[in-house]
Amino acid sequence: TQTGDVILQTRGLSRSFGALKAVDGVDISVKAGQITGLIGPNGAGKSTLFGLIAGEVQPSAGEVIFDGKPISGLRPDRIFRAGLARTFQIPRPFPQMSVLENVMLSATAQSGETFWNNWFRSGLVAAEERRSRERAMEVLAFTGLADKARDLAGVLSGGQQKLLELARVMMVDPPLILLDEPTAGVNPTLIETLIDKIVALNERGVAFLIVEHNMDMVMRICRHIVVMAQGRVIFEGDPAGVMKEQRVVDAYLGD
Ligand code: ADP
Ligand code: MG
């Protein structure tokens, strides 16, 4: 996949909870190497859409195509290993494990049993572990958490936990990262750090789809913006276009 090609596409993607159409016939395209923003008021269906894409929520209808292949119905760990990684609105580290262990576990815990089986069968435990540790230290250095490697993940601040989430997904070198509200609850200094890291990864070719309420950040870093309300895409365009669009203003005012 080259920058500018479509790396992720949803077609008619839908999910109802009882009578509520949380995601209702959503068609979106995300381009490789680009930062795409996903905005909309609370309850618009953004996190549910992420869950559908990442395989955690099963669709009522529609499909997800990643890198030209349908991924609907695949288990979340398969999708993660295929290179489509997500972070959560609320970070979910293992609080009693060290920051380093959390990062090292990322590739393994999410890939299930197979990794461990291969690991033991091949008798390359030490080499694998060394490689994993080296890679983990690299991504911790990149995210600015290297000096926290031995600390328990549970004692990190909210902002540091967001950086830890980013470090964890970086372990699989994903071409596309989905970030759900990366700056929520993060102090202004760390927000700048996060933005720098996202932009730096993007410059290396990583595409992002970012749910974010911080409009300043969205306008600064997103090339393309998709707006959802009540389960549907109501508008998409470049940042300037979105700001001018009355439907977007209405959606936020709860028309
Ligand atoms: P957003 O992330 O845009 O704020 P969500 O995707 O979290 O929106 O939620 C969209 C709608 O779906 C909301 O009305 C929410 O209450 C509902 N919803 C989300 N997940 C579930 C669930 N597991 N069961 C029932 N309703 C849900
Ligand atoms: Mg949400």
Image (cartoon, grey):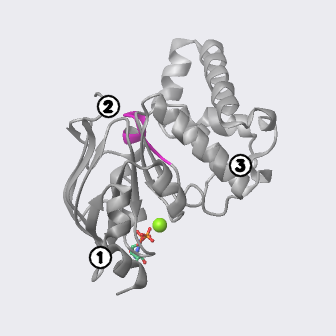
Residue matched to label 3: 160
Disc 2 marks a residue whose amino acid type is Thr
Real-space Cα distance between discs 2 and 1? 30 Å
Asked which quadrant contains residue 230, the reply is bottom left
Numbered mark located on residue 3 in the image: 2
| Residue 152, horizontal then vertical, whole percent | 79, 45
Element at label 3:
helix
Image spot of residue 126 (x, y percent): 66, 14
Residue type highlighted by circle 3: Gln
Image quadrant for the N terminus? Answer: top left
Q: Is residue 166 above or below residue 135?
A: below
| Residue 142 visible, this angle | yes
**Quadrant holding the C terminus:** bottom left
Where is residue 51, by image quadrant? bottom left
State which region is magenta. 79-86
Where is residue 168, by image quadrant?
top right
Of the two numbered discs 3 and 2 on the same chain, state the one appearing first in sequence.
2
The mark nearer the N terminus, 2 or 1, is 2
Which amino acid type corresponds to the residue marked 1 in the rendered image?
A: Arg
Density class for disc 2 (Cα within 10 Å; few <14, some 14-19, many ≥20) is few
Count of marks placed on residues: 3
Seen from the viewer's position, the closer of residues 108 and 143 is: 143
